[in-house]
Image (spheres, rainbow, N blue to C red):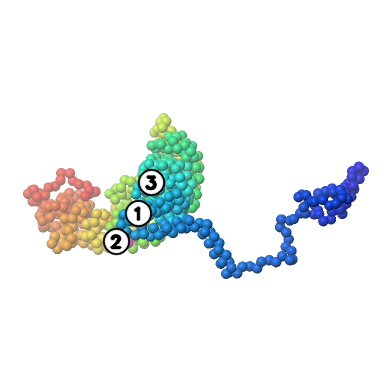
Amino acid sequence: MAPKNQQSNKTNKRKHVSAAKHDAPDRPTSKKPKLAAPKHSGPPTTTKRSEKPFKPKFPKSEPDMVKKPPLSKRERRINAKELAETRKKKRKPYYELEHELASLWEKMRHCNIKKEDRSKLVTEALQKMRGKISEIAGSHISSRVLQTCVKYCSQAEKNAVFEELQPHFLTLAGNTYAVHVVKKMLDNASKTQLAGFISSLHGHVASLLRRKVGSIVIEHTYGLANATQKQELVMELYSAELQLFKDLVSLKESRLVDVISKLNLQKASVLRHMNKVVQPILQKGIVDHSIIHRVLMEYFSIADQPAATDVIQQLSSPLLIRMIESKDGSRIAMLCVKHGSAKERKKIIKGMKGLIGKIAHDHGGSLVLVCIVSTVDDTKLITKVVIREIRKILKELVFDKNGRLPLLQLLHPNCSRYFSPDDLTSLNLSIPSLSAKGESEAKSSKNEEPNKTDSKNDTDTEVTEVEGNENTSGDELHLVEGGKKDPFLRRQELLVNSGLAEGLIDICIESAGELLRSNFGKEVIYEVATGGSDNILCPTLDDKLNTLHAKIASLAAKSSEESEEEHVLKNFHSSRAIRKLVLDCPTFACTLWKKALKGKCELWAKDHSCKVICAFLESSDSKVRGLAKKELQPLIDGGIIKIPETKHSANEG
């Protein structure tokens, strides 16, 4: 129990508080009790500022306060008009300048204006813009005027505009309207100015690439830069060290693996940094630029299995179609097709629906189609999406340099006559962490070069990848490089069973003369007439092939006077195609001899046609040689025909 002293104190406090309430009834009460002021008998004194009555910040509504009625539509319209006029008055000088520039632009942009008059208008407009060019460049109205002025002004005026805009380039690079002015300035910039602009981008490349507008400026700069400057831009995206220390960029190594080895960078740290750069770009769908394709290719070269798999899953969509126009972009697409799962390959192929014609005419796109027909086992899906659209434009594709490549791949896979070494390299690329081939190469490199200090880091990283892959079970692996189906069976299903081969032979019969005289078409008709590699067409389509042979022979049987175009035996391209057919296809050689050349060899024993006749004696088939030997021997003895000492192979022409 509390002592009596404390109880008495509590009662005294309560009495004191109650007395204070009675003494000041008008004052606002508070939670804490306050002592009452002493009473004064004298006259009332003026109250101090602290003793003023309390006024609430938000007083309660009283009954005498009447709410204002809502404004009508007319009143709101009038108020909005007055507000707009007020703002216009505040910016009147700028609006007047825009109006003057627009009137000058209407005059200078016409095609029929004289150069002298246009240069005067451009100079006048630039004088009016002086000091405000950075503001004008970001305006959706006057930025067009500035673009026209930059296009037609003198070099001295361009330099003046560049100097005024230079401090604001980073800001303008992210503006929707100013980006066009920045691109114009870069197109007309000198080497020194371009180098200065690239140096100003240091530390901002990754942030600009994450923005759709800023990425356009980076890509445009990347296209104008030389090899060293391109490397400088790309290196910022590899590592934080390379972004902070610009001097490290002056390296001759272009591959990321070599850079890591040279600078002794930590591969895991580089991978984390690149992942932070790449992921936002992919999530926003900014995949059209070649600099991003370059970065992704380098990312695949060091990525471990989960990281590479994640990027492939993100790219396996219609998004991938926008990447295949560049060299690195088409390689990325081929890697996604090779290392993607069946579900991801299906997404990629379905995303091409309706675009096969456009893709086939592009070089990178045609290589992607070549990869699809050589890798994907789902031939029903390929027939439904790819082959069906190819058949609609088949005649157009056989004459096209790029469009014929998928057809030639089905007829004669990976032939060095039709694919350049660079193309074959692209088709054989793989991701090291997802490829058994990469693992075996890593092991062999470790065994062959154990003592070399320069390659020590590379070997260590590769061995780390191999060990990581060995620890995973076979069922968890994300890819199977290439298809599991037999390549010949896949070709047969896509080429013969789909009806593509039959349509292709019909076009060759219909346009035989045109194809033979064509630089690109002659190779298609040659492969079709020979029956393709491994005689893939012969068992099923022998009758159609015999018809094609007869058609070519009938063209050769015509006299020079009968044919309106250059004769097929005299034409540069067609004579070489027919010569190769004689060497490689005995059936065709017999048909040609009987229908066109028998008894007429002396007539064709000159110019390009002489090569066709000599091919009968160079053939490896004894029956073909026996057909022509009796008639050609007198021409050889008479010196009219000269047989070369070294017989040409079938691949030459």
Q: Are marks 1 and 3 in contact (CB under 8 Å)?
A: no
Magenta stretch contains residue 397: yes
Check the image and report above or below for 333 versus 264.
below
* Residue identified by numbered label 2: 395
Decide: few, some or many residues near mark 3? Use Cα within 10 Å; few <14, some 14-19, many ≥20: some
Magenta stretch contains residue 207: no
Kind of residue at disc 3: Asn
Marker disc for residue 159: 3
Kind of residue at disc 2: Lys
**Label whose residue precedes the other's in the sequence (2 or 3):** 3
Of circles 2 and 1, the one toward us is 1
**Label whose residue precedes the other's in the sequence (1 or 3):** 1
Of circles 2 and 3, the one toward us is 3
Of circles 1 and 3, the one toward us is 1
Query: Which segment is the magenta one?
Result: 393-398
Kind of residue at disc 1: Lys
Q: Main secondary structure of the magenta part?
A: helix
* Secondary structure of residue under mark 3: helix
